[in-house]
Image: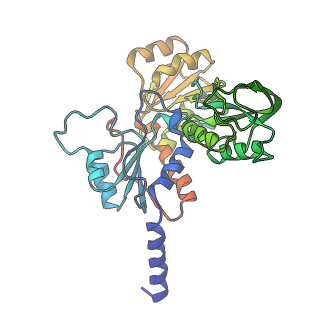
Amino acid sequence: MSPIAKVRFDISAVYHRLMKLRELVSSFEAIAPTKLAESWDNVGLLAGDLDQDVRHVGLTIDLTPAVLDDLVEKGCDAIYAYHPPIFKPLTRLHAPHPAIRAHALGIAVYSPHTALDVALGGTNDVLADLLDLAERRPIATIKAPEDTVKLVTFVPLETAEDRDPLKTVSEAIFEAGGGNIGDYSSCSFRIRGEGTFQGGASTSPKIGTRGRFERVEETRLEIAVPLARIAAVIEALRASHPYEEPAFDLVQLKAPPSKLGMGRIGTMAPSSLEDVVARIKEGLDVAHVLVAGSDRSFRRVAVAAGSAGSLFRDAARAGAELFVTGEMRHHDALEATSLGLTAISVLHSNSERRTLSSVRDRLAHEHAACAFTLSSVDRDPFTIR
């Protein structure tokens, strides 16, 4: 190795060591916010220290012992496992559990699961992309997470110490995490009015005199606050507000209908069953698929990755003619065909695995200091011979 190449390698190695797990978790969350996951799911960081260094991330659908061996051999110090390897509480450990073993080796484990199914660009969109579905929407929408409240408080126009207390209070709230709406920050609503109070014998009012009824010109200040930042915002409000006992309300906001959901339904160029099956086999790299129903020309198609065969009724109500999924129960397949649907099952994880390449590419584009590798032994446990 030349001296210049060695210097470049050493600089790269130092740069790699500066990449923290928390940075990657933030990117994982941006791709598939965990708040979108089903309530029964176990998503997010399952093992690891947010302050640990990460240089190499392995991606897999299932974290099996063979996959863990593969990623350890590749030098991975973090694993993005679509299916949570810890799903239910562990009560016994009769053999080395892959997630426990990974943790013992200092390897972090993160799982997105149903959050990635719902997210834009996630498992269902990747499956829909395979068939070039246009005008797509979720088969079944989810309820939008109610994760924001509105803080309402009242600030005097001026005090003896501060001619602009409204600026002092609002900036403190913004600094603590309030006032963000989408890509906009420092958002608030303000309206003037009159406030009244009468301080008791133990009070020390900043305006007026204790024991006397007071009227004060005030500004009503309304600011949206994430649930996770409420404690910090209230602390900032109390510390910055000129009143001895500032009044405030926290109003729970009703979440609007979500445009996100499970599965996707859309339209494609009219295609025969033979054409659709050929595209699926090539796109998912599978030799065989299971088909139930008639062979005709299809235009309106629904897709649902993983174990989502139960969505066929919603797909049928939305006018789908073809339903593509990972796995489907026997009696559901019978009912689907009775509704006029043709169903294609590709096996559970075969319908999800293509998404890993998309996630890898998105992460690699954002984190050039990290290596991202797909497991070479991750595969569906079933094969059709």
Q: Going 60% across and 21% down the picture, which residue do you hit? A: 320
Seen from this angle, which residue lies furthest bottom? Answer: 3
Measured from the top left, where is residue 146 in percent x and y? 59, 28
Which color scheme does this rendered protein use? rainbow
Between residue 58 and residue 166, name the one nearer to us. 166
Residue 335 x, y percent position in the rendering? 47, 12
Instruction: Work out which quarter of the rendered image holds the N terminus and state it.
Output: bottom left
Residue 349 visible here: yes
Q: Position of residue 282 (x, y in %)?
A: 50, 43
- Measuring 43% from the left and 38% from the top, which residue is drawn there? 43
In this orientation, which residue lies closer to the viewer: 309 or 96?
96
Q: Residue furthest left?
A: 94
Q: Does residue 140 lie above or below 191 as drawn? A: above
Q: Residue at x 57, y 58 (%)?
A: 365
Q: Is residue 81 above or below residue 307?
A: below
**Which quadrant of the figure contains the C terminus?**
top left
User: Is 253 situated left or right of 9 in this image?
Assistant: right
Q: In the depicted view, which residue is nearer to us: 205 or 157?
A: 205
Task: Specify the quadrant of the image occupied by residue 251.
Answer: top right
